[in-house]
Amino acid sequence: MRLSLRQRTERKWLLAAEPDVLEELRRLRARVTHVTGALAATSDGVVLAHDTAVEAEGVAALTAAALGVAQSLAGATGRGAFRELLVRGEHGYVATYAAGSTAVLTVLAGDRTNVGRLHMEARRSGARLADLVSVALSRAEQPQP
């Protein structure tokens, strides 16, 4: 896939925000017991940062696919814009949260996780990530010397 100059510039600035994004992911893991991993990605599946032992690119791609379905489902049922998606598996949870309009936060958690606490803290992290992504994208829009 060939990217336009604008897309390459945006990706450059988004990747420059990686240390701050990674720090937020680590803070989230420290605040919620039984969280085993977290990753931030663009809504089209590009990993911004991850703090997880699972293969981040694959999870980001699956998150983008699930996001598309969740957005369609929310829209088709009149529920408005996507906010979050929770999947409960045999061994725990996968939760995805909107991080602004262009990014998502995906969190992996064990089956003993306090889901209320997970939602509360992940929503806060999603808002912080949205701010970081917004700043990075605004830098990408500024004229380059």
Image (cartoon, grey):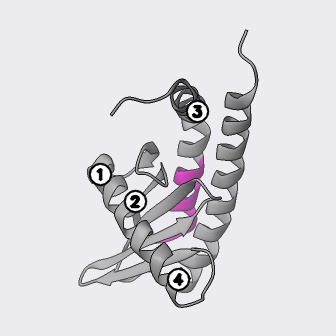
Mark 1: few, some, or many residues within 10 Å (few <14, many ≥20)?
few
Residue 17 in the image, given as x and y percentages of width and height: 60, 35
Sequence order check, earlier mark of 2 and 3: 3
Mark 4: few, some, or many residues within 10 Å (few <14, many ≥20)?
some
- Give the alpha-carbon distance from disc 2 to disc 1, as whole Å: 19 Å
Dot 2 corresponds to which residue?
64
Sequence order check, earlier mark of 3 and 1: 3
- Give the alpha-carbon distance from disc 3 to disc 4, as whole Å: 28 Å
Outermost residue on the left side: it is 90
Closest to the camera, between mark 2 and mark 1, is 2
Q: Is residue 17 above or below residue 26?
A: above
Residue pictured at 25% horizontal, 79% vertical: 91
Mark 2: few, some, or many residues within 10 Å (few <14, many ≥20)?
many
Dot 3 corresponds to which residue?
10
Sequence order check, earlier mark of 2 and 4: 2
The disc label shown at residue 74, or none: 4
- Give the alpha-carbon distance from disc 2 to disc 3, as whole Å: 18 Å
Kind of element beneath mark 2: helix
Dot 1 corresponds to which residue?
53
Residue pictured at 70% horizontal, 45% vertical: 134
Closest to the camera, between mark 3 and mark 1, is 3
Kind of element beneath mark 4: helix
Q: Is residue 66 above or below residue 87?
A: above
Q: Quadrant of the C terminus?
A: top right
Magenta segment, which residues?
24-33
Residue 24 in the image, given as x and y percentages of width and height: 60, 50
The answer, for residue 34, to whether it is visible in the render is no
Q: Is residue 95 above or below residue 144?
A: below
